[in-house]
């Protein structure tokens, strides 16, 4: 319930105002305003808690302190660009001249254009999940090649070669799924679909393909394995020792000894008797 103070002034004294009390308003519009105010007041805590949980999960999964920091920075870059484009389109009306309904703002003057308050709140959670999904998929391949003996730079190149096409195809599929919401009649759904489509395309084709490899290449210039610090590569595997086969001459002598024993048993009286036919 929204509350506001009621001020009353005396016309004979222009500077004299008196507070009579508070006036409480109720209704659908007032409830939405209170909900929006409470949500945006809690949004910084939600963002901070989400990023801390992301860093803790990635740090424990990859046993590194640099990987979660790099992931959060790249994720924050993608979110800033996505919401910045949303502000340009729906608050400043940069695509208003195209006449495409999903990109049209309200018929009010440009000073009153704004996004729906639920759009950034919903889009933030979905984009964080999708961005981390592609990042973890790529980094898992990088760590796999790094543990196999590749350097940091070589591991990034090999991982990009193995996973780049898969990530792009997955991004196109999600773009088509979210893009279907742009043909809806609800402006809030159109705005949400715009943010999701832009975020997925940026993450799959720019962040994963350009930003993350460039960031890891810059970190590779530092001494040591800065990309995975304090993770250490596993020790090199030694070749297993194989016992040599017995020489052929030993096998030949063994075969000769077996043949001699068989010949003696055949020439013995028992052997000759056993070979005679009964009378």
Image: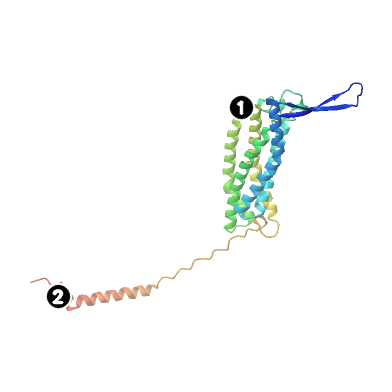
Q: Residue furthest top?
A: 11
Question: Is 230 situated above or below 25?
Answer: below
Question: Is 51 situated above or below 150?
Answer: above
Looking at the image, residue 79 sits to the left or right of residue 169; the answer is right
Badge 2 marks a residue whose secondary structure is helix
Residue behind mark 2: 273
Residue 244 picture location, percent across and down: 43, 71
What distance separates the C-alpha of mark 2 from that of mark 1?
103 Å
Q: Is residue 211 visible?
A: no
Residue behind mark 1: 183
Q: Nearer the viewer, residue 58 or 33?
A: 33
Looking at the picture, the colour scheme in use is rainbow
Residue 64 sits in quarter: bottom right
Residue 88 picture location, percent across and down: 73, 33
Q: Nearer the viewer, residue 48 or 82?
A: 48
Residue 41 picture location, percent across and down: 72, 38
Residue 21 sits in quarter: top right
Residue 81 sits in quarter: top right
Residues at circles 2 and 1 in contact by the CB criterion of under 8 Å:
no
Q: Nearer the viewer, residue 21 or 173?
A: 21
Q: Residue furthest front?
A: 20
- Tag count: 2
The image quadrant where one finds the N terminus is top right
Badge 1 marks a residue whose secondary structure is helix
Q: Nearer the viewer, mark 2 or mark 1?
A: 1
- Look at 57% across and 54% down and name the residue there: 144
Q: Is residue 181 visible?
A: yes
Residue 149 picture location, percent across and down: 59, 59
- Look at 61% across and 53% down and name the residue there: 60
The image quadrant where one finds the C terminus is bottom left
The tag on residue 76 is none
């Amino acid at each position: 319930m929204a509350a506001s103070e009621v001020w009353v002034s005396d016309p004979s004294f222009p500077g004299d105002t008196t507070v009579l009390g508070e006036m409480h308003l109720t209704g659908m519009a007032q409830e939405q305003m209170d909900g929006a105010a409470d949500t945006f007041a809690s949004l910084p805590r939600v963002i901070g808690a989400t990023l801390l949980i992301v860093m803790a999960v990635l740090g424990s999964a990859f046993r590194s302190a640099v990987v979660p920091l790099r992931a959060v920075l790249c994720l924050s870059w993608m979110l800033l660009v996505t919401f910045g484009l949303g502000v340009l389109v729906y608050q400043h009306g940069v695509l208003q001249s195209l006449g495409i309904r999903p990109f049209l703002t309200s018929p009010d003057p440009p000073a009153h254009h704004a996004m729906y308050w639920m759009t950034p709140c919903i889009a933030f959670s979905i984009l964080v999940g999708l961005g981390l999904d592609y990042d973890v998929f790529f980094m898992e391949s990088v760590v796999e090649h790094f543990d196999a003996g590749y350097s940091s730079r070589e591991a990034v190149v090999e991982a990009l070669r193995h996973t780049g096409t898969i990530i792009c195809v997955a991004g196109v599929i999600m773009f088509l799924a979210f893009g279907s919401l742009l043909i809806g009649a609800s402006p809030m759904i159109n705005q949400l679909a715009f943010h999701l489509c832009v975020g997925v395309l940026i993450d799959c084709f720019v962040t994963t393909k350009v930003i993350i490899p460039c960031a890891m290449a810059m970190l590779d210039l530092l001494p040591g394995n800065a990309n995975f610090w304090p993770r250490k590569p596993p020790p090199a595997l030694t070749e297993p020792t194989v016992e040599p086969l017995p020489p052929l001459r030993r096998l030949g002598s063994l075969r000769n000894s077996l043949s001699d024993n068989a010949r003696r048993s055949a020439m013995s009286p028992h052997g000759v008797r056993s070979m005679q036919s009964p009378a």
